[in-house]
Image (cartoon, rainbow, N blue to C red):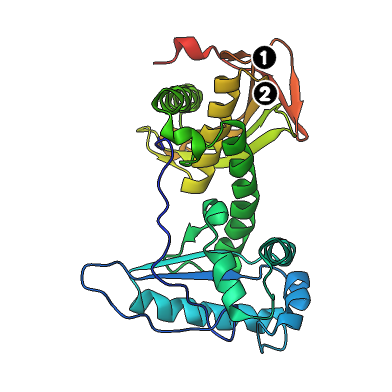
Amino acid sequence: MSHLGRARRNSDCTAGGSRPVVRSHRPRRVEGAEQAFVIGVLTNAADFARARAWGISDAPDHERYLADTADLLAEALERFDTVRARTFHPQDFEEFCLLNGLDPAEPAARDRYLVNPALQTQLLAYQGEELAGDFVPRLVRARENGLTLCHADLLLDGGLYGGAGASDEEHAAWVRAAYERGGEVFRRILVGAGAGVYELRLRVDAPGGGLTAAARVLQWEDGVVRINDEDLELVCAVLCTGLALELPGVAVLHGSQGSAASCGEYLPASWAWSSGGQEWAPADRPVRLDGVAAQPGYSLGTVC
């Protein structure tokens, strides 16, 4: 499972290109230093149209813009040790510029926005995926996940990502213990479900608005699990926050239980658990979460 407060290093440079978001420049390679490329991507046509006033792209439309961005990312994979991307969200950018007294039309403002430490939870590693296929939707989810992670970190006084609370060893140990307990809850949910294709939906009631998470999970017969790193991190962080602050919550795992090894037999599955704040147990009644109906799940205490 994920570890508490996984460090995110700021990049050694930011790069983009006049075509997509920021001006490209070739960094000086320092012996022994990792060279990183960070880019912001306008993920939909409305955001693209809104950002044109800042001179971000010469592309005639969003489709051409995404094609140019895909070419730029392919070049970056050949030149840089690490390539990462995040959603370039016009409203977030405008608020960032207003807060920091920056001109949004200046490339330097976009550089600062992309590597803003408060938004590092939104970064995804790019490894050659089809941009307009799977990767753009992941960028959109990563932004939403990142906002939730920032909320959770605020509730935990910086205990998740090295904020003020991280300097207090007792506070850090308290958050770490809750994170490990949350990871164990998620592990037991998956082990009890067995092989299959599932989606987990999670909600924890919290001050300032509920913390929510969703993750698609593919689990093989041998227990190997496939899940996007950013989704796993969010689930564990939300569980951690609920357990640390003793907040009520509900979780639903639904999908198809079974595998090809069992002659391709798949059964519909939908289970629900709830928490009063201190531990997770089968829900005491049928649950509907985000339109998904579920029956009380199995006892997590009986899962090894």
Which disc number belongs to residue 283? Answer: 1
Q: Are marks 1 and 2 in contact (CB under 8 Å)?
A: yes
Residue at point 53%, 44% (across, down): 231
Q: Looking at the image, can residue 228 be seen?
A: no
Foreground: 82 or 258? Answer: 82
- Of the numbered discs in the image, which one, if any, rests on residue 250? 2
Asked if residue 28 is positioned above or below residue 172 in the image, the reply reads below
Residue 129 picture location, percent across and down: 48, 66
Q: Secondary structure at mark 1?
A: loop
Residue at horizontal 39 percent and vertical 33 percent from the top: 221
Percent x, y for residue 271?
63, 23
Q: Picture quarter containing residue 105?
A: bottom right
Q: Quadrant of the N terminus?
A: top left
Which residue occupies 67% across, 88% down? Answer: 59
Asked which secondary structure carries label 2, the reply is: strand
Give the amino acid at mark 2.
Val
Of the image marks 1 and 2, the number of the one nearer the N terminus: 2
Question: Of the residues shown, which amino acid type is indicated by label 1?
Answer: Ala
